[in-house]
Image (cartoon, rainbow, N blue to C red):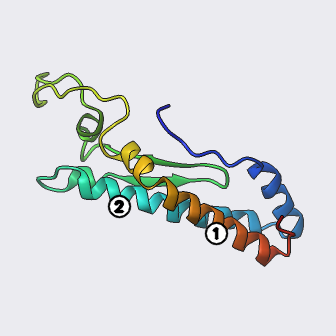
Amino acid sequence: MPDKIEITGLREFQAALRQVDADLPKQLRVAQNEAMGLIIDYASAHMPSVKGAARASLKGRSTQREAKIGLGGRKAPYAPWLDFGGQGRIKGRPAPRPFIREGRYVYKGLRVKRDDITKILTDGLTALAASAGLEIT
């Protein structure tokens, strides 16, 4: 995988939140969704567009421990080709595009916005711990 952000101790933090209130771990998604929004905004602003289907296909999915961004789908099956490149000129597809393993938009957004994402996650998790009455060290 080209790039990702891992939070050490997230499983233990989730368990501590669950001991305080069973609904608190659900709030972990709030900070993750906000951080994902930064990446989606970056990728969407830089992705080429004719009708906007590829940009609209950028969707975030999160759980309490994980956040992912997907692109493509039925309305924009070419979106991964836009981001990573690959073979073309297969019936109904455009010309070949140089393959870039690191991607042009989504993973680049993660790299460019990494500091902002780290701050959002740190602030969000710290605020959640404080609201749960957990000691922050």
Q: Nearer the viewer, residue 117 or 41?
A: 117
Q: Badge 1 local density, few (<14 within 10 Å), some, or many (20+)?
A: few
Say whether disc 2 or disc 1 marks the residue closer to the N-terminus: 2
| Secondary structure at numbered mark 1 | helix
Q: Position of residue 38 (x, y in %)?
A: 42, 61
Q: Is residue 3 above or below residue 22?
A: above
| Secondary structure at numbered mark 2 | helix
Q: Nearer the viewer, residue 26 or 113?
A: 113
Q: Mark 2 highlights which residue?
A: 41
Q: Is residue 133 above or below residue 83?
A: below
Q: Amino acid at mark 2?
A: Asp
Q: Is residue 56 visible?
A: no
Residue 30 as seen in the image, left or right of residue 129: left
Q: Amino acid at mark 1?
A: Asp
Residue 61 as seen in the image, left or right of residue 80: right
**Mark 2 and mark 1: span between their CA atoms?**
20 Å
Q: Position of residue 77 (x, y in %)?
A: 26, 39
Q: Position of residue 37 (x, y in %)?
A: 44, 62
Q: Residue at x 51, y 57 (%)?
A: 115
Q: Residue at x 57, y 58 (%)?
A: 118
Residue 123 image label: 1
Q: Is residue 101 visible?
A: yes
Q: Position of residue 19 (x, y in %)?
A: 89, 64
Marks 2 and 1 close (CB-CB < 8 Å)? no
Quarter placement of the C terminus: bottom right
